[in-house]
Amino acid sequence: MHSFIVKNIKDLDSVSAQLIKSYPTDKLFIFEGQMGSGKTTLIKIICKQLGVIDTTSSPTFSMINEYRTEKGSKIYHMDFYRIKNLEEVYDMGYEDYFYSDNYCFIEWPEKIAELLPENAVHVNICLQGVERLIITC
């Protein structure tokens, strides 16, 4: 298990680099944490580390954003906060994304827990005080 203490947003650059380095063959990451804990921010920084050339943003309303890297790879960023039932996830063809061998970053995974592969990397973000995060994976 890895654990990181983040005291300011600048620390997220090194945390994201460590996450990528610590899981060199893993592509599916699920991000857990309360609303406003920094899940989307961390994913944006990880995408930057991975060479994403597109603008990254929260897929809260679209459910999924697809980004391209400078090398032409795809990265998927999913947010299941607003799903009403699993049928929506089946309809979007979630398996094509989860098993694509492209990076796939998922927010609000607890909404689709029964669909998640066992080998997903769990990243937990815990707010501690006003400006301190504990990130474990």
Image (cartoon, rainbow, N blue to C red):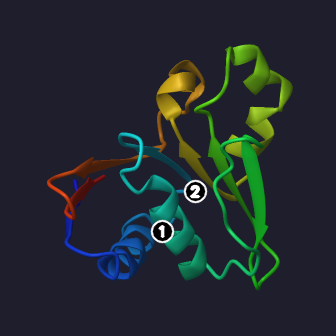
Task: Pick whichever, 56 or 50, lies toward us.
Answer: 56
Q: Secondary structure at mark 1?
A: loop
Q: Is residue 56 above or below residue 82?
A: below
The label shown at residue 24 is: 1
Residue type at mark 1 is: Pro
Could you tell me which residue is drawn at 60 percent across and 24 percent down? 115
Q: Is residue 85 above or below residue 104?
A: above
Q: Secondary structure at mark 2?
A: loop
Say whether residue 124 is visible. yes
Task: Pick whichever, 130 or 28, lies toward us.
Answer: 130
Label 2, residues with CA under 10 Å away: few <14, some 14-19, many ≥20:
some
Tell whether 79 sits left or right of 76.
left
Could you tell me which residue is drawn at 41 percent across and 42 percent down? 35
Label 1, residues with CA under 10 Å away: few <14, some 14-19, many ≥20:
few
Tell whether 27 sits left or right of 61.
left
Q: Is residue 41 above or below residue 89?
A: below
Tell whether 89 sits left or right of 34.
right
* Residue that numbered label 2 is attached to: 27
Could you tell me which residue is drawn at 73 percent across and 73 percent down? 55
